[in-house]
Image (cartoon, rainbow, N blue to C red):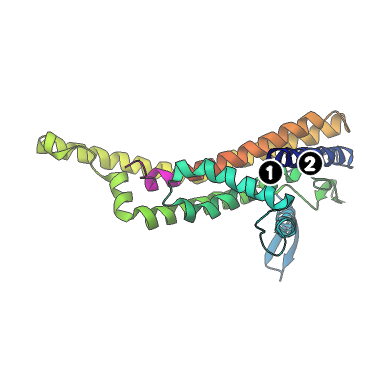
Amino acid sequence: MACASRWRIVFSLCLLAAVAFSLACWWPVTTGHVSKGAYELFRIAQRLPVTNAMVTNWVLAVVVIFGVRFAIGQKPLVIPGRGQAVLEMLLEKLHDLFEPIIGKHVMPHAFPLLLTLFIYILVQNLSGLFPGVGAFGIRAGGHFYYFFRPTNADLNSTLGLAMVSFLGWLYFVLRYAGPKEFFHDTFGNKADRKELPFSIYLVLGLVFIGVGLVDVISILFRIVSLSFRLYGNVFGGENLITKMLGLVGYLFPVPFYLLEALIGLIQAVVFTMLSAVYIGLLTNHDAE
């Protein structure tokens, strides 16, 4: 019964996705191009600019929050309903995926961050496929300004996600591995003092310090790699779909919608997986 119920849930999700893709393909869209940056729609107190990517972000965040509350209800049940079963299945799969990477000691503390990153990035990656996104707006100065834009098609959004991942990595490493472990892993001499002459051991110490400086650059470069990888894939997919809809329209772009959905899922997994790997490199000592 449990297996049959799970397959019914999967079938329902696939049917819902197919309906969403069909609506998106028949929804009116512009035939222009996707701009590299988000459009400023208005300002709060004439100071804080609000862009179309930010509006999409806020709307989807509210939808996800109320969607989860609707699926679970007032409180989780011992015998879960369909909505709660789907969420529990997602949590279980993600927990089993990340635990060997991070380790059992840090997993209860880091899992909420990783889960939030995965769900947020996945929803925002798929936002370009939702009906109405990239469809409505105003035309001014010979250009069309969208009211809604896929959030992760804006480099500011992916850069912010990379910063959150980096700060989370820094906190968990310093909290559960400690500054001493971090500096030893980065700059420490890994050679065995008892097996080497002091002069060679000293030279190797200088070499490891140089390697540590290179490692610091690579750690800081993670912000660039995480943000640009996610931005490039989402922005490229948004351009592809826009061009296909402009050239052909309607049913022909459906395979591209499915491809973009797959890429959005893969990029969410890659971003979250890399964040987990960075944390687990210094905190996962279960094997010892």
Magenta stretch bounds: 278-288
Q: Is residue 8 magenta?
A: no
Question: Callout 1 environment at 10 Å: few (<14), some (14 to 19), or many (20+)?
Answer: many
Q: Looking at the rendering, in which quadrant would you find the N terminus?
A: top right
Residue 133 visible somewhere in the drawing: yes
Q: Is residue 180 left or right of residue 102?
A: left
Question: Callout 2 environment at 10 Å: few (<14), some (14 to 19), or many (20+)?
Answer: few
Q: Is residue 211 left or right of residue 87?
A: left
Q: Is residue 53 left or right of residue 21?
A: left
Q: Amino acid at mark 2?
A: Ser
Residue pointed to by mark 2:
12
Residue pointed to by mark 1:
125
Residue 34 image point, x, y percent: 75, 41
Residue at 80% across, 50% down: 146
Residue 155 visible somewhere in the drawing: no
Q: Total marks drawn? A: 2
- Residue at the far bottom: name it: 45
Residue at 79% across, 45% down: 130
